[in-house]
Image: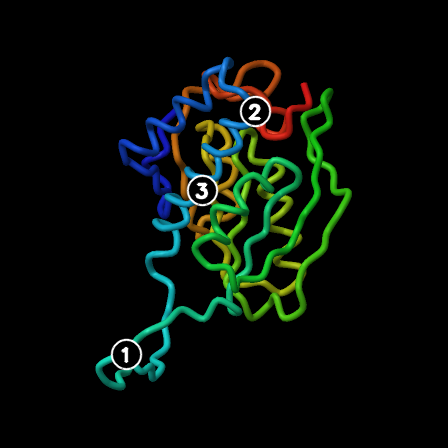
Amino acid sequence: MEVKEFEKVYVLDHPLIKHKITRIRDKNTPTSEFRQMVKEIAIMEAYEAMKNLPTKMVEVETPIEKTTQPIVEGDKLCFVPILRAGLGMVDGFTSLLPTAHVGHIGLYRDEATHEPHEYYCKLPKGLENMKVFLLDPMLATGGSANDAVKMLKKHGVKDISFCCIIAAPEGVEAFKKENPDIPLYIGALDRELNNRAYICPGLGDAGDRIFGTF
């Protein structure tokens, strides 16, 4: 299944990202390394996803002279992981912008129907005036991502980007059909979903591998 027909879909083509994704695909990669690699991939993805952030000019004094230079307003940004696997990406994003807000959306997937169900939502005040980066390592069916976007929009959010590490073409199609204007950043686009709605070749259950709960 091709995804080229969708606008604002960015598959990141960087050898370091490819290298680290290969490491987390390996079933023998231990939890500690898996967790660290997810953080490092998230840092590189954040760098790409935030390259067009607006800046404002402020005056600073260097050891030589006063000057006016651009800064990013971190308090106008919010990183929202989809629990629980999305937590693995938060440290990577906040390491680049520690002043950003962090919210949380909890969704779990029914093992029989593969449908997402909400169990938690905690978002900062004033979210409707922030740029939000929605984080989840896996975009499989697209159900959780679409539901999370709906929850954000109910809170008045207008500026959303979605960042994942691995996506299935079926998930990309489902997400972009509902959210054509939301930028989608992908570390690797995989082949397909299997009959259990797992991404192939994928990396298994990202949450289990991040937290060591097998």
x%, y% of residue 202? 48, 21
Q: Give the residue drawn at x 59%, y 24%.
A: 209
Amino acid on which disc 3 is placed: Ala
Residue to which mark 3 is pinned: 42
Point out the image quarter for the N terminus: top left
Q: What label does residue 62 carry, if any?
A: 1
Q: What label does residue 31 carry, if any?
A: 2
Q: Give the residue drawn at x 64%, y 24%.
A: 212
Q: Earlier in the sequence, mark 3 or mark 2?
A: 2
**Which one is in front in this view, the residue at disc 2 or the one at disc 1?**
1
Q: How many C-alpha atoms fall within 10 Å of the one at disc 1: few (<14), some, or many (≥20)?
A: few
Toward the right, the furthest residue is 119
**Which one is in front in this view, the residue at disc 1 or the one at disc 3?**
1
Q: Give the residue drawn at x 34%, y 37%.
A: 11
- For mark 2, give the secondary structure: helix
- For mark 3, give the secondary structure: helix
x%, y% of residue 166? 45, 30
Q: How many C-alpha atoms fall within 10 Å of the one at disc 3: few (<14), some, or many (≥20)?
A: many
x%, y% of residue 127? 61, 66
Point out the image quarter for the C terminus: top right
Toward the front, the furthest residue is 63
Looking at the picture, tell me which residue is in the foreground, 72 or 195.
72
Q: How is the image coloured?
A: rainbow
Looking at the picture, tell me which residue is in the foreground, 110 or 39.
39
Amino acid on which disc 1 is placed: Thr
Query: In the picture shown, does residue 69 fall above or below 183?
Result: below
Q: How many C-alpha atoms fall within 10 Å of the one at disc 2: few (<14), some, or many (≥20)?
A: some
